[in-house]
Amino acid sequence: MQKRSINAAGAPQPAGGYAQLCEVSDARRWAFVSGQIPQDVDGKVPETFAEQARLVWANIETQLGAIDMTFDNLVKVTTFLSDRTYNLENRAVRNDVLGDRKPAMTVIIAGIFDSKWLLEIEAVAAG
C-alpha cells in the first residue's frame, strides 16, 4: 500500500497534526473503526479530558491490533468533542499519540451519547 498526506497549495493549510487529503493506492484491505469511547474494559471512565483522550486512542490501537494494523494504517479520523473548549487539548494529545502520522482529519462538536464521555473517535485504516 502507498499512502500520501497532501495539503494542496490553493486551499487553507491545516492547523496541526493532520493532512487535508490522504491518498491511498494499492490497498488490499480497509478497516472501519466504530466510534471508540473513553471507557476501559471494566467500564471506568477517567475524569480528565487528557486521560479520556489517551484511553480512546489506546482503544483504537487495540482495535487495529486485532487485525494486525497500527496507527501507521490510519487514513481518516473523525473526532467528536462534547465541547469546543477541548479543541487544543485534543490536538495536543492527538499529536503526541500519532507523532509524524498525518491522516485526514475532521473534528466535530456534538452531543455525545453518555454525558461522562468528553469525546469519541472513529477511524478508517487501510493496508
Image (cartoon, grey):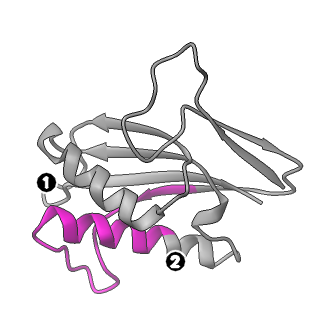
Q: Amino acid at mark 1?
A: Ser
Find residue 84 and report its image quarter: top left
Most extreme residue toward the top, as rendered?
10
Give neighbour class at mark 2: few <14, some 14-19, many 20+ (Cα, 10 Å).
Answer: some
Q: Is residue 94 left or right of residue 24?
A: left
Nearest to the observer: residue 84 or residue 32 = 84
Residue placed at 41% from the left, 74% from the top? 58
Marker disc for residue 127: none
At which x and y percent is residue 66? 63, 79
Q: Amino acid at mark 2?
A: Thr
Give neighbour class at mark 1: few <14, some 14-19, many 20+ (Cα, 10 Å).
Answer: few
In the rendered structure, which disc, 2 or 1, sits on the residue that comes first in sequence? 2
Reply above or below: 18 against 48: above
Find residue 114 and report its image quarter: bottom left
At which x and y percent is residue 112? 24, 46
Reply above or below: 109 against 121: above
Q: Which residue is mark 2?
A: 62
Give me the C-alpha separation between circle 2 and circle 1.
24 Å
Judged from the image, the secondary structure of the residue bearing numbered disc 2 is helix
Reply above or below: 29 against 51: above
Is residue 36 in the magenta section?
A: yes
Nearest to the observer: residue 96 or residue 79 = 96
| Magenta-drawn segment | 33-60
Residue placed at 63% from the left, 64% from the top? 72
Give the number of callouts. 2
Residue placed at 37% from the left, 58% from the top? 94
Instruction: For the N terminus, give its image quadrant.
Output: bottom right
Q: Which residue is mark 1?
A: 115
At which x and y percent is residue 97? 41, 67
Instruction: For the C terminus, give its image quadrant.
Output: bottom right
Nearest to the observer: residue 14 or residue 103 = 14
Q: Is residue 82 left or right of residue 16?
A: left
